Image (tube, rainbow, N blue to C red):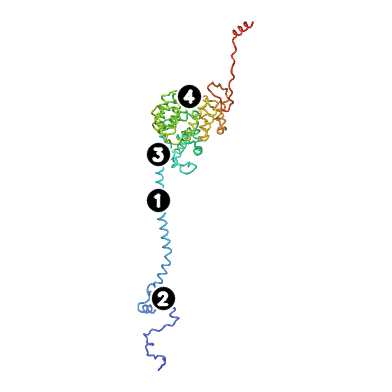
Amino acid sequence: MVTTRGPLPPGSAKHSPMARPVPDESQAAGAVERGDSGFDRQLARLYGDSLFGPWLDPGQYLAATRTTRRHGAPFRRLALLVLVLCVGAAVGWIVRAGLLRRAGEDREHVAYSLASFLREGELDRAAQFLALLRGPKATLDPHDPHLDLIIRGEAALYRYQDADPARLGRIKPYLSSATTGPASGQRVLASLAVASRQERAARLALLEPLRSAFDRDPEFHYLMATALEHKGEVKQARQAWDRAFELGPLWLAHRYEQAWFEARQGRPEAVSKLVGRLMRDAPDSAWARLAWERFGGDRAAKSEVSGAAGSARPAPAVALFHQQFALALAQVRADPVAARRSLGQAVAAVNGQAPFVFDAFDWLVEAKAMGLARDLTGFEDWPRHSELAAARLQRLAEPERRPDQNPPAASEPQTKPKKQVKKPGRAKSKAKARRRR
């Protein structure tokens, strides 16, 4: 049986004063938007509103806190990123400063080693440390604290080792004012090292003020000796040679040239001493072999050079230059054509560099080989556009009194002298006339 529900009587529970009216849908939606609920209204009736606004149910509270977290998260991430970047930058700066300090210490060690090897004459080792100190750059840094040492090393390797034009090109801008204006002693010595002997003799006054600072430097005394020798001051030159030998016996190129100096002065005992020292200190070097071949030595040195032939090191370009030049001097009397060929090979070994060519010309003039000196001026590598070359050509243009032992140049026509017929004396002519009668 179905009964229909009619309106409730006034005394029913739904119309009691304590009964809670049921809100309609619009009221419920407004309550949700305001964050109210039935529990909130009951709390509000009992205790009043919260000091912080209407009461929120747990769901609405969590939603509000999630909104707060969403708005604060980007700022926290940005702050964390800035902190990480600052820490990374600080760590990078510390590491970079440590690496730079370590690199500076390593470079100081390389510079010290280079200076030591240059002082002792160990040019092979000096070349290795010079490459480390200079770096891969084709040009030098004008603000490098070791610039003078690098210039000195490049000049030494150019003049006594390989005659590389690239080395001279790197240091030439720094040497142009070394002999005309104020410059460090290292640059003055470098500028005189790459010059010819005649130029050193002309600038001998530049060496005297450096004596106190470089008195323990063997190359300083070598430069002094070659300049004095070119000026004809043999006694002072020998003193400088002896001092250079005392300070730097392992400067092999210097020892060979010193032996040649003593040979030209006619002192075979001094030559034998120098050659023997070369054979004891560096028997496998090209300079020792060259000194033995040119000047000879005692029997002990002969056994040493024969034993070291298998382990001989390759000859530097400057040693080849001296070897071929010595061969040309030995051939000039018997075969001027072969001498000219050997002289050309000597010039080619040093890449036709002007200081070596000028020295060769002066040595040929000193040896009275004027014909071979004239041949040298006709080479393609002869520096024609130079005041020094013009002065040497002027020396050849002077009237020449050629001794009998001085052969003509290979380029000159070699004509045999006519056989002179000795005319009979006047007394013999009268006797012949009487017999005819």
Q: Is residue 401 above or below residue 94?
A: above
CA separation in Å, label 1 and label 2: 58 Å
Nearer the observer, disc 1 or disc 3?
A: 3
Single out the mark in the foreground, 1 or 4. Answer: 4
Marks 1 and 4 sit apart, C-alpha to C-alpha, by: 61 Å
**Mark 2 Cα shell of 10 Å, populated few (<14), some (14-19), many (≥20):** some
Q: Which mark is residue 35?
A: 2
Q: Kindly identify the amino acid type of the residue bearing the numbered disc 2.
A: Gly
Q: Amino acid at mark 4?
A: Gly
**The C terminus lies in quadrant:** top right
* Residue 87 horizontal/vertical position (percent): 40, 55
Residue 101 locus on image (x, y percent): 40, 46
- Return the disc, 1 or 2, that comes first in the chain's sequence: 2
Q: Earlier in the sequence, mark 2 or mark 3?
A: 2
Say which residue label 1 marks. Answer: 95
Residue type marked 3: Ser
Of badges 2 and 4, nearer the viewer stands 4
User: Is the C-beta separation of discs 1 and 2 under 8 Å?
Assistant: no
Checking the image for residue 113, the label placed there is 3
Of the numbered discs 4 and 3, the one sitting upstream in the chain is: 3
Identify the element where label 1 is drawn. Answer: helix
- Mark 4 to mark 3 CA distance (whole Å): 37 Å
Considering only order in the chain, which callout, 4 or 1, is on the residue closer to the N terminus? 1
On residue 232, which mark appears? 4
